[in-house]
Amino acid sequence: ADSQGAATPAAAAAGQPATAAAAAAAKPAGTRPQRPPPLSPTDAAERWLKAAGRRMRVAIVNEAPYHLEIVAGFLHVLSQLPVDVTWYQAGQSVPAVSAVELLEVTGFNKLLGFMPRMRPTTDQPEPVDFAVFVSPEYFERQTQAFLKAAKPISAVMLAHNGMNRALQRIQAFDHPRLHFAALAPHVAAASRQVLRIHTHWMMATWPFASQRPCKSSSEDADTCLSGFSIQGNFESARRNYTRVWALMGAAQSAGVLPTTPPAKPFHLHLLGRGNVKTLGVPFAVANMTTVHLNLKFPQYYDQIHHTHALLMLLGSNNYLLQKMSSTVVSSLMTGTPIIADAKVLNSYTFLKPETVHLMAPGETEMDVMQRVSGVQAQQQEHAIVRRGCGWAAVRYVQRCCGVVVALCLAAVAEPGLAVGLLLATFCSVLSSFSAVLNALETCFTYAPRC
């Protein structure tokens, strides 16, 4: 029987019940039809090779010298699939830095631990079957040129700002199979409601592995974790630094900041790029802060990993309505929970109370920071949240794999290929994710922390 319970011709030929009613009568009450076991990725790849004579060709295209953490996430997701991936990466114009130099300067190659097949976006693109565009809304002309040159059968455009009218212009490109996806549900909702673009959502994160990983036990947290982090470009429009300075000053004046054992001294780490003067660190709290400027990717995420939690300090409600916060991406990459209130959870609906340090009504970020770094019983609660954050990242990678494969299905309609067989191949790959990624969970980078 098929998944709907109807008898198939093969079942009838084998002498099995020829109707759904007969099939139901032959089975114990309440028994659901059993699906065939999923194909392994190797079997699926062999079917593709047999039908097409080659593996599916996939391109990751990033015309920006930023959003590299998103590129890393999709390199990780696509590594789970039996496809050939080529990554097209832009360099930086001012000052002039080539794509190869950019990856070296930022330490991106060391973050990955391997060098995928990368080509500068200035190269003539090769023909591909499927393409993922990481920063299309900021590089419309380059995106359109790549589509015309590489001729992907199907392509997905990642949206960073769900109300950016550039997405509508991209939708009007002369291409039959353009899909849109956002990194968070509220960004996708903004795109659907304001721009009237059907937009999926999928979160792809790279599983950062520290050379000195912090486990999620309360004992390890006491020795491995220290202080709190604020990450991202030093821009007041992105983060409300004034708020945290006011909270620290008030706590200092009230004498409630920990300064003596057994509690660790309170400390705040600010990581990013830009003008340090933008931070406006008051002299009164300067000894409780450390600025980490222009760290390479491995050091950047390692520093975050070794702190108790990340502060979002959103500089605008746009990050709750239409934009994606990079702090959430850093949290999922490093397993370091964010401090969030109910408004954040209402927007980033994939985050659950057990995966963040939740601010109760009337609490401030300072209240939560004091609680997290407090007594043993509260540290145990912190360990549970940290563990939940790590496993949440695994679930979102699973979901992203499913969405990517579903969008890949549009590419199997290429004339001249065995469409039915290819469709079955990718459906089987999609169904195999539950088995493949369940196994992946046992050896995933976050596992040692649990």
Image: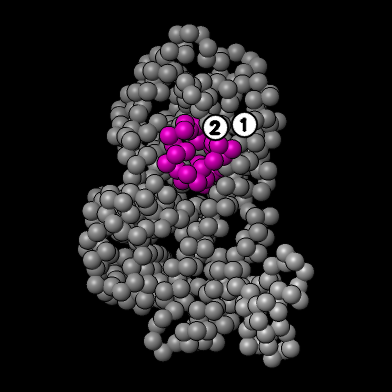
Residue located at (29% from left, 34% from top) = 237
Q: Nearer the viewer, residue 428 or 147?
A: 428
Q: Quadrant of the N terminus?
A: bottom right
On screen, residue 383 versus residue 138, left or right, reads: right
Residue in the foreground of this view, choosing between 24 and 406: 24
Residue matched to label 2: 357
Q: Are marks 2 and 1 in contact (CB under 8 Å)?
A: yes
x and y percentages locating residue 309 in the rendered image: 53, 33
Is 296 a magenta residue?
A: no
N-term-proximal mark, 2 vs 1: 2
Mark 2 surroundings: few (<14), some (14-19) or many (≥20) residues within 10 A: many
Q: Which amino acid type is marked by label 2?
A: His
Residue 155: percent from the left, percent from the top?
A: 36, 68
Specify few, some or many for label 1: CA neighbours under 10 Å numbering under 14, 14-19, or 20 or more.
many
Residue 382 is tagged as 1
**What span is in magenta?**
329-357
Where residue 30 appears, as percent x and y from the top left, is 72, 64
In front of the other: 225 or 17: 17
Residue 257 in view, yes or no: yes
For the residues marked 2 and 1, what is the alpha-carbon distance in whole angstroms? 8 Å
